[in-house]
Image (cartoon, rainbow, N blue to C red):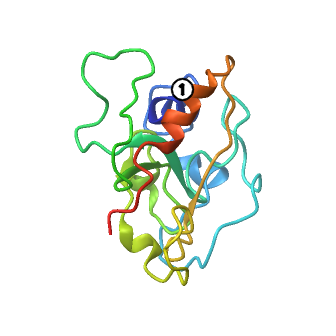
């Protein structure tokens, strides 16, 4: 999903930092407030958000389509803004992971990917998508209601996929 689509789905019609009361977060999110958890859990082990989506807060940090912009969404685009990727790093990741405390799981919390996430990739050349050092990173499958034209899909897929070193 785009970053805006991800946040919209995570909030599920709510306006707070979480789709639930923070005191109930452990019922909905796989997180690690004590730094003792050693990995993710099977999808759906916690309750879903009001729209039936599981693990929007925690479990694994989720890739978004956008290039990471430290200032957030682009100005002037109110409906589904997208920062089109121009480089491989950084890309947006949202939702926090099993390794994170609650503040990193907020609906608006975000981070940018780093090349160090695949430092130990044994392949030469290094894979675009195999992130050996990011065991807390995952993705969510989405499908648009209206399928984009093949040319548009090709352009989005191929923008910024070249490794810069």
Is residue 82 toward the left or the right of residue 138 in the image?
left
In this view, the residue in front, 43 or 31, is 43
- Residue at (49% x, 73% y) in the render: 126
Q: Which residue is mark 1?
A: 152
Task: Examine the rendered structure and indicate whether residue 160 appears above or below residue 41.
Answer: above
In this view, the residue in front, 124 or 96, is 124
Is residue 17 toward the left or the right of residue 150 in the image?
left
User: Does the rendering let one see residue 1?
Assistant: no
- Residue at (63% x, 27% y) in the render: 150
Q: Quadrant of residue 113?
A: bottom left
Q: Quadrant of residue 163?
A: bottom left
For label 1, the SS is helix
* Horizontal and vertical percent position of residue 151: 56, 27
- Residue at (43% x, 15% y) in the render: 79
Q: How many marks?
A: 1
* Horizontal and vertical percent position of residue 23: 53, 48
Task: Examine the rendered structure and indicate whether residue 70 appears above or below residue 88.
Answer: above
* Horizontal and vertical percent position of residue 76: 26, 15
Q: What quarter of the picture does the N terminus occupy?
A: top right
Task: Examine the rendered structure and indicate whether residue 56 appears above or below residue 124.
Answer: above
- Residue at (49% x, 44% y) in the render: 158
User: Does the rendering let one see residue 42?
Assistant: yes
Task: Examine the rendered structure and indicate whether residue 131 appears above or below residue 124.
Answer: above
Badge 1: residue crowd in 10 Å (few <14, some 14–19, many ≥20): few
Is residue 37 toward the left or the right of residue 48 in the image?
left
* Horizontal and vertical percent position of residue 73: 31, 30
Q: What quarter of the picture does the C terminus occupy?
A: bottom left
């Amino acid at each position: 999903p785009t970053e805006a689509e991800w946040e919209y789905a995570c909030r599920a019609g709510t306006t707070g930092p979480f789709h639930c009361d923070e005191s109930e977060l452990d019922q909905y999110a796989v997180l690690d407030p004590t730094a003792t958890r050693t990995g993710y859990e099977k999808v759906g082990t916690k309750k879903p958000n009001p729209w039936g989506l599981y693990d929007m807060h925690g479990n694994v940090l989720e890739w978004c389509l956008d290039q990471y912009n430290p200032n957030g969404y682009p100005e002037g685009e109110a409906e589904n803004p997208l920062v089109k990727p121009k480089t491989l790093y950084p890309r947006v990741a949202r939702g926090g992971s099993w390794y994170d405390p609650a503040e990193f799981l907020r609906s608006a919390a975000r981070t940018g990917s780093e090349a160090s996430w695949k430092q130990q990739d044994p392949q030469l050349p290094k894979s675009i998508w195999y992130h050996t050092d990011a065991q807390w990173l995952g993705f969510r499958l989405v499908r648009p209601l209206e399928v984009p034209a093949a040319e548009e899909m090709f352009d989005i897929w191929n923008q910024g996929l070249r490794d810069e070193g």
